[in-house]
Image (tube, rainbow, N blue to C red):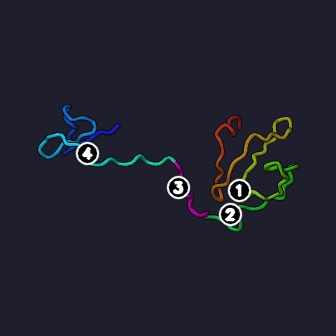
Amino acid sequence: MCVCVFGGHNLPPTCQSFQLESKDRSCTKTSSMHPRPSLLPRALPPSISTPRTCGISSNFDVGERIHNGRPSISGLYPWMVLFSFFSSFHERNLPCGGTLVSKRWVLTAAHCFRYI
């Protein structure tokens, strides 16, 4: 859908959607149309961080690690966060994960802290 405006006024009802109002207030055919924007992503910008400048490897052992069906080593994904809480019965609760977005901030879902 296209809305054409000329001089701050909407098109008069006599103009069709494929026409524009000219200076003399007559309807003329449009000479070109703007292409629809692409919904495909453009190339991603180069990475702004490296493993040496962001994230700290963890040596905390939480058991076996599997990624894409293969064993994974500790610290391979230093930007991933696991939230671990102890319940009132001293049981470990592992409700959610997150991603480090800066030195002090973790991005996670709101429901992860619903009962805290």
Q: CA distance from mark 3 to mark 1?
A: 25 Å
Residue type indicated by callout 1: Trp
Q: Earlier in the sequence, mark 4 or mark 2?
A: 4
Q: Residue 54: which numbered mark, if any?
A: 2
- Identified at 78% across, 61% down, the residue is 57
For label 4, the crowd category at 10 Å Cα-Cα, with few meaning under 14, some 14 to 19 and many 20 or more, is: few
Q: Check contact, mark 2 vs mark 3: CB within 8 A.
A: no
Say if 43 sits above or below 32 in the image: below
Q: Check contact, mark 2 vs mark 1: CB within 8 A.
A: yes
**Which residue is labeled 1 in the image?**
79
Look at the image and tell me in which quarter the C terminus lies: top right
Q: Nearer the viewer, mark 2 or mark 3?
A: 3
Q: Check contact, mark 4 vs mark 1: CB within 8 A.
A: no
Residue at the outermost left position: 24
Question: Over which residues does the magenta segment extend?
Answer: 40-47
Residue type indicated by callout 3: Arg
Look at the image and tell me in which quarter the N terminus lies: top left
Residue 86 lies, in percent from the top left, at 81, 41
Residue 16 lies, in percent from the top left, at 24, 35
Q: CA distance from mark 2 to mark 1?
A: 8 Å
**Which residue is labeled 3 in the image?**
42
Residue at the outermost bottom position: 52
Q: Earlier in the sequence, mark 3 or mark 1?
A: 3
Residue at the outermost top position: 13
**Which residue is labeled 4 in the image?**
30
Say if 82 sits above or below 116 in the image: below
Q: Earlier in the sequence, mark 2 or mark 1?
A: 2
